[in-house]
Image (spheres, helix red, strand yellow):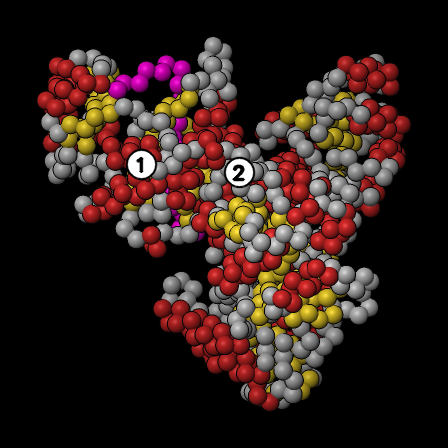
Amino acid sequence: MSIRNLDALFSPSTIALIGASNRPGSVGAVLARNLYGAGFAGPILTVNPRERAIRSTLNYQTISELPLAPDLAIIATPAATVPELIHELGTRGCRAAVVISAGFGEGENEDGDALKKAMLEAARPFLMRIVGPNCLGILSPHVGINASFAHLTPAKGDIAFVTQSGAVATSILDWASARGIGFSHVASLGSMSDVDFGDMLDYLALDPKTHSILLYAEAVTEARKFLSAARMASRNKPVVVVKAGRSTAGAKAALSHTGALAGADAVYDAAFRRAGMLRVHTLDELFQAAGTLATGIRVKGDRLAILTNGGGVGVLAVDELADMHGQLAELSEATLKRLDALLPKDWSHANPVDILGDAPGQRYAGALDALLDEPDIDAIFVMNCPVAVADSLDAAQAVVETLGSRRPPVLTCWLGEKSPTEARRLFASRRIPTYETPEQAIRALRHLSSYWRNQQSLMETPPVVSDAITIDQAKAESIIDGVLEDGRSVLTEPEATAILAAYDIPTAPAITARTPEEASQAAQQLGFPVVVKILSRDISHKSDVGGVQLNLASPGAVLQAAEDMLASIQRIAPQAHIDGFNVQSMIHRPDAHELIVGIAEDSVFGPLILFGQGGTAVEVIGDRVVGLPPLNQLLAREMIQESRISRLLRGYRDRPAADLEAITLTLIKLSHLVCGLERVVELDINPLLADPSGVIALDARIVVRAERAHRRPLAIRPYPYQLEQEIETQRGGRYALRPIRPEDENALVDMLRRSSKEDVRLRFFNTIQNFNHAFAARLTQIDYDREMAFVAMPPGEASIVGVVRLLATPDKEDAELAIMVRSDMKGSGLGYCLMEKILDYARSTGIRHVFADVLRENHRMVKMAEELGFAIEPKDNSSDPPMVTMTLDLAE
């Protein structure tokens, strides 16, 4: 449902407190105290069947007696009473409720679960939104709302804090109060029966009072909605999250290596990165990161220069930087000469730049100015230790004056407790990030660089690689059909290899044999040496039972190995059914690295892809990176770079670099596989050999299930190939029509540049001179779950001649429409055809209303809309230039 009626939570006209009390120390009494004391300007009405007044204000016995319909209700009554109260409130017109009460299924209580369902059923007819149950409440300082039982009301600020834990909320409020940190909103979501993180992110992304969003999460529900909202919010403002439960104990056992390796926390980590969010690991880091990002400084890497008046603390900073995998910047000869001319002869002559303990402000200013001009520095860390022979405040003022109005990535740390107070105030007043210790500052640099990388990944345009992939999905589906008809869920290795081949993943030549004698004959056909592997639907990991023999060089060796294999399995796993043997050519690649790539399914985020170092000790090595499909080339490369083995893959000593493009392409092919084959539950390729000549899969394991509907949906909706089609206008023009892709950025910019300035102004309501990457990325990198854009292209051409776009509200009931046809194509009938296609799409997805704001002077657009049945109304008679709103009811 998302943001529908969430405005009633944060800007209600009237609030009702159900369960208010005068009993000292009770939740109802604390709620009443906080509500009345926070400064809310509207009416606050209380309901308690046994009280005449609450805090000297007239109390009402029942909801029906309330003289006004409340927008927002706070409920603190026993759980059993809540469903009926929700019904009564909905009947009165209440649009949102915060349920403080517990007892709704926490700890898997069946009676509580039934109450929760009854509560939601009672709210549904009225579209009433529920926060909670079992929550602290909500606070909105800007409008004077403290609808919580917190011990204090926070100051006004621009940080929104959303948490599942009430205890964490009160702790953070106390911590922030002591540091003078204010909030735009604080929301404790409790059990998240209705309003969840996705809803809150959608609302806060557009809230003008919120400049950054902090999340404390224990679990995520509705992964696709969460990621869709998070990606949208992250494009607008910093989103920082701390996730509880980082241990691997929550990972479920699985048949495959991939399932065992893909711990729950690794999946959350991948999801947060994919959404452009910054993940931190402690509550202290949460606010430090928010404060750092709020300063507005940005970094493009982690090459750090350190400027200090104390050599020892400089070394501590270097150690911390190394622990955080950062880099100490190399100073150029030009910079070193400049510093030599400015500094005493005993300065460090290297980075860290130790300008000695007696450094006055002037020395700080000169050294900082030199470092600011060094192109190979991504950030500068300025430190000061209090000394008797120099003034710390003078040094701080020098830093501030040197920076002036510039916003370079400079972080500061004035050490001590009493001496640096005024310096820290000065930095804070100029929005220059400052920290109490070197460790905090280095951590802040990591936050900045991680956030920048995530944002770049979110906005970067991938190259086109689809033409390099040949897929035979029908063949793969037929193999799965045969396995399921045979009553199996685990494919044999030859079957798994055939599916990989259908997705163009290189595999070793192999022949299936039923007996040791046939295995010997098969080996002669393939040529020696060979590998012999047992075929059994009952054996998951062949090496564990002696089911793999390598480097067999003669028919006799193959025969003996197969017979020994049967004897070993009879001893270790006598119940296993033996189907025969798989005889493969022995691949000899002495410089190859053993990798593992695979597919698993997460209980929250659905299908995922894994990459790391492979081999028989894969679980022990534990080198794995998790990614969420669909992958493009950039995302696949990022997965490889995040792994520990990536450093070896780049080559070292006399070992050449592996073909990273081939590894990248294999991950993309796996992404196509997981998006196309919905019945695949788990997949392992281990090992995948990689060397300079490419990759080859030596062993594969696939697990399938019968019903497609049982698989969790992809957390990110993939590119919808099924919507590609050919269209014909009423005037006979033919065009290829397909959803827009990130790779279309250049073609889209070319279309805009080839259009008249007037047409661009009519489409974007402004004259745009520079179609930069950020502008184009927002138009081409869309979330297919809530947004759709079709591009029209002449047959056989890569140029775009028209785009029609639909952006749905988070509840997907209403959607905003936009269209543009290249100027030289106007009058061809293409625009009308595009409008018809996008309206057909809107109807097919259940959108009920379509609207568009259009300049009144855009006569062609207004006329076309009227022909399609849109209602045209003035948007605002006072607007300049005047606009009209076009609306179409698709439900009629």
* SS label for mark 2: loop
Q: Check disc 2 and report the residue beneath it.
A: 796
Please identify, in this view, whether the residue under mark 1 or under mark 2 is nearer the observer. Answer: 2
Disc 1 to disc 2: CB gap under 8 Å: no
Q: Is residue 879 magenta?
A: no
At a point 71% along the width and 41% down the height, the residue shown is: 753
* SS label for mark 1: helix
Answer with mark 1 or mark 2, whichever residue precedes in sequence: 1
Instruction: Determine whether 534 is above or below 881 in the image.
Output: above
Q: Which residues are magenta?
A: 585-604
Amino acid type, label 2: Gly
Instruction: Determine whether 778 is above or below 634 in the image.
Output: below
The circle drawn on residue 499 is 1
The residue positioned farthest toward the top in the image shown: 654
Along the viewing direction, whichever of 868 and 648 lies nearer the viewer:
868
Q: Quadrant of residue 27?
A: bottom right
Location of residue 5 in the rendering, given as x and y in whole percent from the top left corner: 60, 70
Q: Quadrant of residue 16?
A: bottom right
Location of residue 304 in the rendering, given as x and y in whole percent from the top left corner: 69, 27
Q: Quadrant of residue 537?
A: top left
Q: Is residue 136 visible?
A: no
